[in-house]
Image (spheres, rainbow, N blue to C red):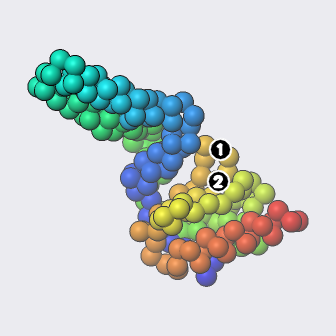
Amino acid sequence: MNEIEYELREKDIRFYNDIKLINNADFKRSMTQNQAIIPGALSVIAFFYFLYYQDFRTGLIIGAIGVVWGLAVPAYLRYSSWQQVRQKYSDSDLKNILGKRTLKIQPGRIIETKDGEESTIPWKDVMRIEVNKARTYGFIYFDHNAALIIPKKTVKKAKFMDFMVQAMEFHAEADDD
């Protein structure tokens, strides 16, 4: 099957941006610091208060702050980064990006149809094709920051993995030429 119909939602764009963030070295360092190092240091301080001063209440408060920090700050960082990404898109941009789409793969190109408008993408413009580990999303990358996002949940026509495998085969054939 070389045609797939799906709907792109805002949460799919959020997932794609989360993947880009997770692969960013600065964001990884910040997440490690906020998920492990700071809560770990607070836990050591809490343990010290408990053992040395035998102040259970203060140790418990500091330990609780460490746990809350380890859970809340990374969630806030993700939310904040999504807000920054969201501000880059106007409502009309989002209207153009979101919605139902049809992708057809052919030996020389990918044809994307949205709202009756067709756009053709030659295989030579495709960098790579990936499926995430959970096999819930497929990505057809054009450069490091741009990709067609294909969410498995909203696929209506064809089978998700069959389409992605066939797209990978067409892409490999185009690379050989």
Q: Residue at x 42, y 48 (%)?
A: 14
Count how many numbered circles sit on residues in the image.
Answer: 2
Identified by mark 2, the residue type is Tyr
The answer to whether 34 is drawn above or below residue 141 in the figure is above
Label 2 environment density (alpha carbons within 10 Å; few <14, some 14–19, many ≥20): some
Residue type at the position of mark 1:
His
The one of 48 and 172 positioned closer to us in this rendering? 48
Report helix, strand or loop for mark 2: strand
Outermost left residue: 57
Question: Who is closer to the viewer here, 137 or 8?
Answer: 137
Task: Give the residue at x 56% y 74%.
Answer: 161
Where's residue 159, x and y in %?
52, 79
Quadrant in the picture for residue 170: bottom right
Tell me the residue that label 2 is attached to. Answer: 141
Residue named by callout 1: 144
Mark 2 in CB contact with mark 1 (< 8 angstroms): yes
How dense is the environment of label 1, judged by Cα within 10 Å: few (below 14), some, or many (20 and up)? few
**Left or right position of 176 against 58:** right
